[in-house]
Amino acid sequence: MTTPTRISTLALRHVIPDPLAIDQWAEVRPLIDGRDVLAGIHPGGVSSCSRREWFGPAEGWPLAALEEPRRVELSNNDCYTGCCGGIFVTVHRRGDRVLWSSWQNTNDIRVPVPADVHFDAAQYDAEPARAAADTAWEEPVDTVARLVTQELVHSGWFERWDCVVDRVEPRREEPEGVEVYFTSRRKTPPHGPGFTFDLPVTPDVTAEEQARRLVDRITSDDPRETAELL
C-alpha cells in the first residue's frame, strides 16, 4: 500500500538583525510545521529572504512558487554564499502542491539536509501574502524604512530627474536612521555618480510622521542638489 504524501505547513517569521549585520532589513525565516528549518541545518546563519525583497509583485518574492523550478538561497553567513556557503533549495509548483527539493548545504556538507517537503499550494501562497502585510514586528526604523520605500516607489520622483533609486537601508546602529541611495543616468560613468540621503529616525515622533517629513525633504527639490555625493 502506498504511504500518503505528508503535507507540511509553511510559516514565515520576521527576525530583527544585529545592528552590525550587513543586511539591516529584517530576516524572513521559514518555519516548516512550526520548526525553524534553518536553525537546524545552518545554526548561526542568517536568512537570505530579507524583508527588502517583499515590496514588489508576489511573483518576485523570494519564496514564490512558479511553474518553472527555481533554485532559492535560504541562508548565508552574513556574507556572499559563493565565498562562505549557505542553504539552497529548489522551489517548484506542481498543480495544487508546492515542492521543496534538491536541498544543498554549501556551508557544511556534513550536515544532513531535509528530505523533499510538500505543501498545499493554497496555504503556501497565503503565508507570504500574510507575512508581507504583517507590520506588528516592526521597530520604528523598520516602519520608516518601509513607508519611505513604498512612497518613493510610487511617487516617480527620481524618474522625473532621470535618476534611479538603488536601495533604501534601515540603519540600526546608533544613531538610527534610513539611508536612500540613488544614481543619476545623465553623467558618466554609465549610471552616473552615486548619491545618498542619510535621514535620522528618532523615538519622540511617530514613524508615520517621520516618514512623511523625510519624503517631503527628499522631494522638495532636484535630489542631486540636496543629497550627499558618494
Image (tube, helix red, strand yellow):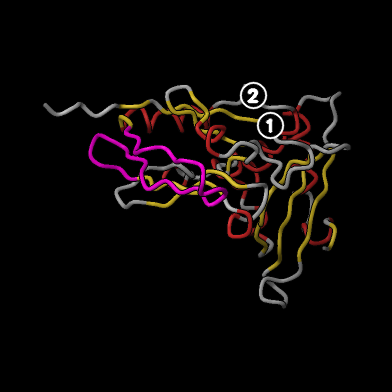
Closest to the observer, 223 or 72: 72
Report the side of 144 relative to 95 (left or right): right
Q: Secondary structure at mark 1?
A: loop
Q: Sequence order check: which comes first, mark 1 or mark 2? A: 1
Q: Magenta segment range?
A: 92-118
Residue 122, image x and y in percent? 32, 29
Quadrant location, the C terminus: bottom right
Q: Secondary structure at mark 2?
A: loop
Tell me how far mark 1 sits from mark 2, CA to CA: 8 Å
Q: From what the image shows, is residue 172 above or below residue 165?
A: above
Q: From what the image shows, is residue 182 above or below residue 96?
A: below
The residue beneath circle 1 is 16
Q: Label 2 sits on what residue type?
A: Trp
The answer to the question of whether label 1 and label 2 lie on touching residues, with beta carbons closer than 8 A, is: yes
Report the side of 145 relative to 106 (left or right): right
The residue beneath circle 2 is 137
Closest to the observer, 180 or 121: 121
